[in-house]
Image: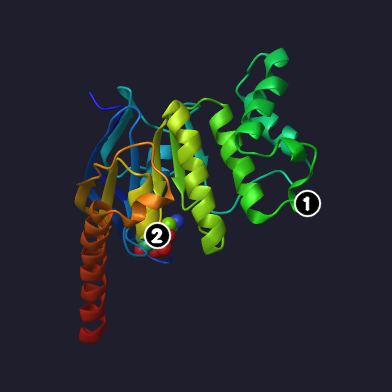
Amino acid sequence: MAQIDVSDLTIEYKLPKSDGVFKAVDSVSLAVEKGEFVTIVGSSGCGKSTLLLAIAGLVKIAGGRISIEGRDVDGPGQDRSVVFQEPSLMPWSTVLANVRFGLQMRRWKKDDITERAMRFIKLVGLEQFSDYYPHQLSGGMRQRVNIARALAVDPTVLLMDEPFGALDAQTREIMGEELLFIWERDRKTALFVTHDIDEAILLADKVVVMGRNPGHIKDVMQIDLPRPRNGEIVDSPQFVEYRKRLRRHLHDDMAAMQLVREAV
Ligand SMILES: Nc1ncnc2c1ncn2[C@@H]1O[C@H](COP(=O)(O)OP(=O)(O)OP(=O)(O)O)[C@@H](O)[C@H]1O
Ligand SMILES: [Mg+2]
């Protein structure tokens, strides 16, 4: 049995100012194995965030089901950590206090909390900044704190929605490599939404390509590149092939959007 099992999932949002609904995700099925790193790509509005939020238990399911280790998801749970595009740190607390907070909420033993929080702060390379406040850090550093907090609670599943989306290209690349380095150590099951094709391939065991109107899965690409990986792999012939295939998919989607626009 897969660790995360999404079957025939449909999500609908209530339309504003009417009784109607908008189908954001339509009959999506997806199996994620324990320890797998899955990235999700697709054009804007195809339901990537909605799918992730549904797995996080943060939106209502209209049809189908999601289960994690055999248990149905019917709300948020301690087995899942979520990292959003914008770091959501408590501005009045230090880096250490922010990472500790997640552990306190999950009732880790008091004595272990600081030690464990520091271990993960160190893992993301911020041990010299543990008593800094979020406003004293750069965007990339803040997102690293966010990732440390998400990992420290030892979730079964790590859900990330464009966690590097707000960063410049260079920082983003560094963060991607760093995340890989961290992930290689304990191989948490991870779902990662991104707009960046190279990032999607570099990180993934498989890339899920979504299409729109309504949101569905178009393709699942298995990425058979050796691990551990680093940024240099993007020039390998196999990587270039994957990139071509993904570009074609996304290009088809954009072309379809263009046709719709021309028709109206
Ligand atoms: N809370 C909401 N209420 C109503 N409609 C919503 C809501 N959230 C999302 N939608 C709609 O659902 C569709 C999918 O949105 P979603 O945010 O999942 O897309 P996405 O693939 O994450 O896009 P992006 O790449 O731009 O982040 C969109 O058409 C969006 O307008
Ligand atoms: Mg989104």
- Residue 166 rendering spot, x and y as whole percentages: 56, 60
Q: Nearer the viewer, residue 128 or 97?
A: 128
Q: Nearer the viewer, residue 59 or 150?
A: 150
Q: Can you say whether 11 is above or below 130 in the image?
A: below
Residue at point 64%, 26% (across, down): 119
Q: Position of residue 163 (x, y in %)?
A: 51, 50
Count numbered badges in the picture: 2
Q: Amino acid at mark 1?
A: Gln
Say whether residue 233 is left or right of residue 249.
right
Is ligand 1 closer than 8 angstroms to the Cβ of mark 2?
A: no
196 in relation to 183, above or below: below
Q: Earlier in the sequence, mark 1 or mark 2?
A: 1
Quadrant location, the C terminus: bottom left
Q: Residue at x 53, y 51 (%)?
A: 174
| Amino acid type shown at disc 2 | Asp
Residue 223 visible in the picture: yes
User: What is the secondary structure assignment of the residue under circle 2?
Assistant: loop
Callout 1–callout 2 Cβ contact below 8 Å: no
Q: Residue at x 25, y 79 (%)?
A: 258
Near mark 1 (Cα within 10 A), the count class, few <14, some 14-19 or many ≥20, is: few
Residue 196 shows which numbered tag? Answer: 2
Q: CA distance from mark 1 to mark 2?
A: 28 Å
On screen, residue 104 versus residue 17, left or right, reads: right
Helix, strand or loop at mark 1: helix
Task: Name the residue tied to disc 1.
Answer: 136
Residue 53, position as x, y percentages in the image = 42, 45
Q: Quadrant of ligand 2?
A: bottom left
Rendering quarter of residue 168: bottom right
Dot 2 alpha-carbon crowd within 10 angstroms: few under 14, some 14 to 19, many 20 or more: some
